């Protein structure tokens, strides 16, 4: 990983952008092809949207997501630049911290990201801020392409989750790449627009702690409640849990 330190900022940001976009295209495009085009018909899975999917909606979700993936370069720049003077706790040599911390840092990142998302998402649902979030709610029934369909202000707010996390805890450089990949996969799953687990399964251990497409689908449909990203934790504590689509 030391080789990353030898790259200049333009090279780092170019690689980051290519990685962001190619991961999005592979995972979102792959999910769409596998679930919407193949398994939906084969396994007779019902989509949440009772109507057929419109190309103009997918196009909007895709273009806004591309904009957000580009905005994700802002935290990369800030974290890489200011970790040099110790503002952010990023480390490059895995031996600088224990292996226990390396694995624990994923658990902490997961909980901190869920916390950051829940509270910023709730803020975006207040009257003065909803204008920044309304683009995301144009998808009444989202498809995987909606994973990052945010307006620019919301894109910057959500990208700063990683600034927030790396201000608080030390993260190895590989954790950023692996955790953001996990985050993308979970986000795409939340916007799948159909349920691949049965309602009973979703309420069994360990699935009952997580958000599933039916729950985030409920949020898109009614624009209130179910504000969490990965977990039901904050929604349960704050009384904003609404369950899934009927
Ligand atoms: Zn959404
Ligand atoms: Zn929302």
Image (tube, grey):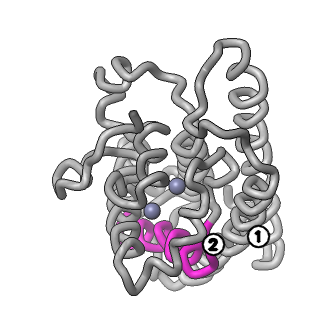
Nearest the eye: 18 or 117: 117
In the drawing, what numbered circle is on residue 93? none
Q: Is residue 92 rendered magenta in the image?
A: no
Q: Under 8 Å from ligand 1: the CB of mark 1?
A: no
Q: Give the position of the C terminus as an image quadrant.
A: top left
Q: Residue furthest top?
A: 43
Nearest the eye: 97 or 63: 63
The correct choice, above or below, for 149 with respect to 73 in the image is: above
Query: Does 10 sit left or right of 124 as displayed?
Result: right
Main secondary-structure element of the magenta-colored stretch: helix
Residue drawn 60% across and 70% down? 135
**Residue picked out by circle 2:** 76
Q: Quadrant of residue 62?
A: bottom right
Cα separation, mark 2 vs mark 1, equals 9 Å
Q: Which residues are magenta?
A: 150-169
Secondary structure at badge 2 equals helix
Residue drawn 32% across and 60% down? 115
Q: Quadrant of residue 199?
A: top left
Asked whether the residues under the numbered discs 2 and 1 touch, taking CB atoms below 8 Å apart as contact, a structural biologist would say yes
Q: Position of residue 111 (x, y in %)?
A: 34, 52
Query: Does 21 sit left or right of 224 as displayed?
Result: right
Query: Does 174 sit left or right of 120 as displayed?
Result: right
The reply to whether residue 173 is in sight is yes
Q: Which is more foreground, mark 2 or mark 1?
A: 2
In the drawing, what numbered circle is on residue 12? 1
Query: Does 69 sit left or right of 187 as displayed?
Result: right
Q: Position of residue 64 (x, y in %)?
A: 71, 67
The reply to whether residue 178 is in sight is no
Nearest the eye: 206 or 103: 206
Q: Position of residue 102 (x, y in %)?
A: 43, 47
Secondary structure at badge 1 equals helix
Q: Which badge, 2 or 1, comes first in the chain's sequence?
A: 1
């Amino acid at each position: 990983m030391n080789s990353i330190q030898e790259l200049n900022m333009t090279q780092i940001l170019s690689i980051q952008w290519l990685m962001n976009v190619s991961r999005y295209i592979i995972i979102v495009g792959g999910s769409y092809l596998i679930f919407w085009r193949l398994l939906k018909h084969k396994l007779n899975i019902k989509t949440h949207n009772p109507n057929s999917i419109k190309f103009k909606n997918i196009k909007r979700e895709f273009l806004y997501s591309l904009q957000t993936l580009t905005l994700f370069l802002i935290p990369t720049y800030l974290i890489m630049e200011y970790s040099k003077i110790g503002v952010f706790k990023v480390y490059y040599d895995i031996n600088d911290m224990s292996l226990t911390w390396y694995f624990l840092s994923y658990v902490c990142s997961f909980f901190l990201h869920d916390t950051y998302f829940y509270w910023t998402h709730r803020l975006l649902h207040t009257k003065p801020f909803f204008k920044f979030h309304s683009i995301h709610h144009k998808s009444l029934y989202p498809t995987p392409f909606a994973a990052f369909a945010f307006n620019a202000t919301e894109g910057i707010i959500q990208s700063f989750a990683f600034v927030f996390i790396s201000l608080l805890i030390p993260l190895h450089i590989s954790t950023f790449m692996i955790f953001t990949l996990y985050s993308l996969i979970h986000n795409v799953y939340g916007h799948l627009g159909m349920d691949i687990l049965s309602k009973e399964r979703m309420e069994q251990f360990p699935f009952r702690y997580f958000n599933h497409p039916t729950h985030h689908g409920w949020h898109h449909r009614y624009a209130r409640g179910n504000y969490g990203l990965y977990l039901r934790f904050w929604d349960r504590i704050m009384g904003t849990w609404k369950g899934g689509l009927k």
